[in-house]
Amino acid sequence: MSDDGVVAGAAMPEPAWLAIGRELKAIAQIGLTFNRDPYDRERYERIRALAAAVIAAGSGHDARAVLEGFRAESGYATPKVDVRAAAFDAGKILLVREVSDGLWTLPGGWADVNETPSMSAVREVVEESGFEARAVKLAAVYDYRKSNRPRHLDSIYKLFFLCELTGGSARPSIETSDVAFFARHELPELSVGRTTAAQIERMFRHAGEPGLPTDFD
C-alpha cells in the first residue's frame, strides 16, 4: 500500500479482505469520533487495530505502519470525491500525461474544499492542461471499486463532467508532462486508477448524444 492509499493488485473482483478492512476502519473511525464512553472507545480502538491487521495481511504491508496511518484520520468516515473533465476539440478528447506514472488520463483530481464539483473539474483542466473551460454536463458518477484499478483503501466517488473549451492553450504543469487530443480509437496507454478506456468511451457517447442521462452506480 502506497502513501496515497493505493493497494497493489489488479484482479477482479475486489478481494474480501479489502472490503472488510475498509468497512471496519470506517466503523472504528466514526465510533471514536462520536463516542465518549471509555469502554466503548477501547472496543473501537480494537476494531481499528483489527482493520489494520486485515489490510496488512491482505496487502503484505506492516500492520503497525497501517495502523499509524489509520490513527491520523478522524471525523466521520465518508467517500472521497474525484472529479474528471472530458473536453473535446474536432472530435478528439483532451488527455494529459501524468508525471507520477507517465500514463495518460482525463484532467482531474480530488475535489477541493469551498469549490463546487464543477468548479473543481474546470480548475483541474486549467491547472493540468493550460486550457480554460466551462462545465456543461455531469455525465457520470461512478464508484471507484467497480471500474478502476489498482485497488484503493479509500472509498471513492468519481464525477465526470463534459466540458467546453473556452480558451487557453496546451501547457503541461508540475503534475503533467504532456497535453494532447486523441481520437476515439487511438487512445494512449492510460493511468487506469484515474481514467479507464471504458470511461472515456462513455464520455464520447455523452458528447455525441447530449440527451443521454447521467450514468451512476
Image: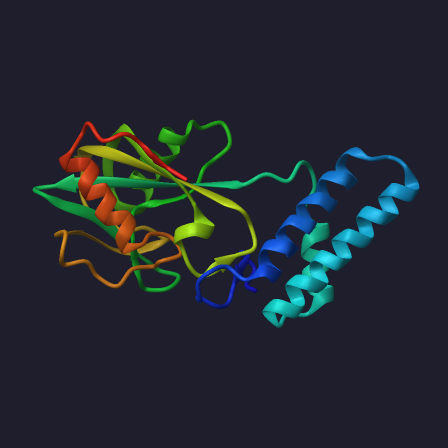
Quadrant in the picture for residue 160: top left
Name above or below for residue 11 compared with residue 40: below
> Which residue: 25% across, 35% down?
162
Q: Nearer the viewer, residue 130 or 30?
A: 30
- In the rendered structure, the answer to whether residue 50 lies left or right of residue 159 reads right
Residue 171 seen in the current view = no
> 60 above or below 201?
below
In percent of width and height, residue 70 lies at 69, 53
Corner quadrant of residue 209: top left
Color scheme of the displayed model: rainbow
Residue in the picture at 43% in, 51% down: 146
User: Residue 113, image x and y in percent?
Assistant: 51, 32
Furthest residue toward bottom: 60
Q: Quadrant of the C terminus?
A: top left
Report the side of 25 relative to 125 (left or right). Answer: right
The reply to whether residue 169 is visible in this rendering is: yes
* Residue in the picture at 18% in, 46% down: 93
- Tell me: residue 115, above or below residue 178: above
Please provide percent x and percent y for residue 18: 59, 59
Residue 56 placement, left or right of 7:
right
State the count of labels. 0
Q: Is residue 212 above or below residue 27?
A: above
Residue sticking out furthest to the left:
90
State the residue in front, 12 or 176.
Answer: 12
* Image quadrant containing the N terminus: bottom right
